[in-house]
Image (cartoon, rainbow, N blue to C red):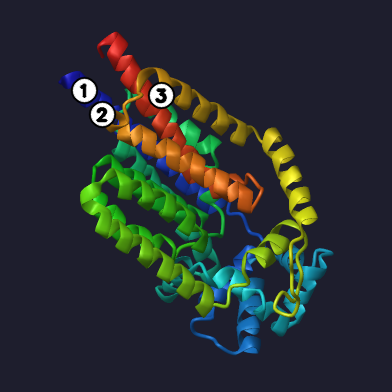
């Protein structure tokens, strides 16, 4: 018993040190790119409705927040898009629908600014906080279920899969990572009612989370017969929130976002009808597949996922006895596959939650095998 207490003590210290490192790194190495402007504008748009006044507020405060060299890069840098954004409030206003649909993230930025934090710094303060909270949720989700060796190496996998990136980034990616971590924690504790209640709110963080909601809730629908009505209600609620956000903020739709993100940025997306031809899609898909094969993080995920599937076949065929492992594996594969088909990129900041989910499934399975054959 004493040995176990000592192990727990060192484990807690180990994770607190890891969290402290992430905290310091996030504060001192924030990633400042143009998206920080879009999110600050979207947050402040809740208060400032006039296009010119909003534009003036954002760029005036940006000048105070970054140094002169960084300001020139964000407002010019030889990039016509950035020049247009800095000089034309009307064109700048047309970019907001890309960012405003991340409602909870934008409201969090505004809230932090209201209690005294710099509104630009708030964009990555949120990412740091969400990343740290996600670490603790994941730790408590697996602490008593996996072999202690995996608990010690788990932080290295978090770093491999992009935790240090999302923790310093001005985007809702860390908040989405927190949402998925919360799902893992609640599922590990068999709190399915809580999952069904809270998952519709994930869509308020980023609308494409509707993919995760559909896959997770549909699985719960078939797995828990007594919760089928609640599953349907949760799914309907997620869909209503998704439709409302897209309509309220005049979201441009898949084709425009696809073209804007993966083909060419235009300064006036509201004035042009962006369409994607089959040729355009195949070209982007081909590039995405080639880049995925060169992406060591994605390849690592594939190796982990393949290992889990093989081991599941030999050691854990019975679904009922290995629900957690099977669910994490199915949800991870389905989400990454669907997302890659829709947007053929393997940016780890978008996939980190599913990479981690897959890793946890593998750790759980390996821990079972170790316990079975070594009587640990």
Residue at left offset 34%, top offset 22%: 367
Residue 302: x percent and y percent?
Answer: 56, 31
Location of residue 194 in the rendering, given as x and y in whole percent from the top left corner: 26, 55
**Point 42% across, 28% down: residue:** 362
In contact (CB < 8 Å): disc 2 and disc 1: yes
**Numbered label attached to residue 26:** none
The tag on residue 4 is: 1
Judged by depth in the image, the label closer to the viewer, 3 or 1, is: 3
The Cα–Cα distance between marks 2 and 1, rounded to whole angstroms, is: 6 Å
Q: Which class describes the residues within 10 Å of circle 1: few (<14), some (14-19), or many (20+)?
A: few
**Is 246 situated above or below 365?**
below
Residue 286 position, x and y percent, is 75, 43
Residue under label 2: 8
Residue where numbered disc 3 is placed? 312
Residues at marks 3 and 2, CA–CA distance in whole angstroms: 29 Å
- Pointers 3 and 2 in contact (C-beta within 8 Å): no
């Amino acid at each position: 018993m004493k040995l176990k207490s000592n192990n727990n003590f060192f484990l807690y210290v180990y994770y607190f040190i890891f969290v402290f490192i992430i905290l310091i790194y996030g504060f001192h190495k924030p990633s400042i790119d143009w998206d920080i402007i879009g999110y600050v504008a979207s947050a402040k748009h809740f208060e400032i409705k006039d296009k010119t006044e909003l534009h003036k507020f954002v760029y005036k405060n940006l000048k105070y927040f970054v140094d002169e060299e960084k300001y020139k890069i964000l407002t010019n840098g030889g990039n016509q898009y950035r020049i247009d954004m800095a000089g034309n409030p009307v064109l700048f206003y047309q970019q907001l629908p890309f960012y405003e649909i991340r409602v909870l993230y934008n409201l969090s930025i505004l809230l932090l600014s209201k209690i005294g934090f710099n509104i630009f710094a708030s964009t990555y303060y949120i990412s740091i906080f969400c990343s740290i909270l996600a670490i603790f949720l994941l730790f408590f989700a697996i602490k008593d279920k996996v072999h202690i060796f995996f608990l010690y190496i788990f932080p290295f996998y978090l770093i491999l899969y992009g935790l240090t990136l999302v923790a310093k980034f001005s985007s809702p990616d860390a908040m989405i990572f927190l949402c998925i971590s919360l799902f893992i924690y609640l599922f590990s504790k068999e709190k399915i009612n809580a999952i069904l209640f809270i998952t519709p709110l994930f869509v308020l963080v980023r609308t494409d989370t509707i993919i995760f909601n559909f896959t997770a809730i549909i699985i719960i629908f078939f797995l828990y017969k007594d919760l089928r009505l609640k599953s349907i209600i949760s799914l309907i609620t997620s869909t209503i929130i998704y439709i409302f956000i897209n309509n309220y903020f005049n979201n441009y739709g898949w084709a425009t976002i696809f073209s804007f993100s993966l083909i060419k940025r235009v300064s006036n997306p509201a004035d042009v009808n962006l369409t994607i031809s089959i040729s355009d899609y195949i070209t982007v898909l081909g590039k995405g597949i080639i880049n995925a094969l060169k992406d060591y993080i994605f390849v690592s995920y594939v190796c982990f996922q393949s290992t889990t599937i093989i081991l599941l076949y030999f050691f854990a065929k019975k679904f009922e006895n290995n629900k957690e492992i099977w669910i994490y594996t199915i949800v991870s594969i389905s989400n990454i596959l669907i997302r890659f088909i829709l947007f053929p990129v393997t940016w780890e900041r978008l996939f980190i939650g599913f990479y981690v989910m897959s890793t946890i499934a593998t750790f759980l399975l390996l821990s079972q095998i170790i316990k079975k054959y070594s009587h640990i």
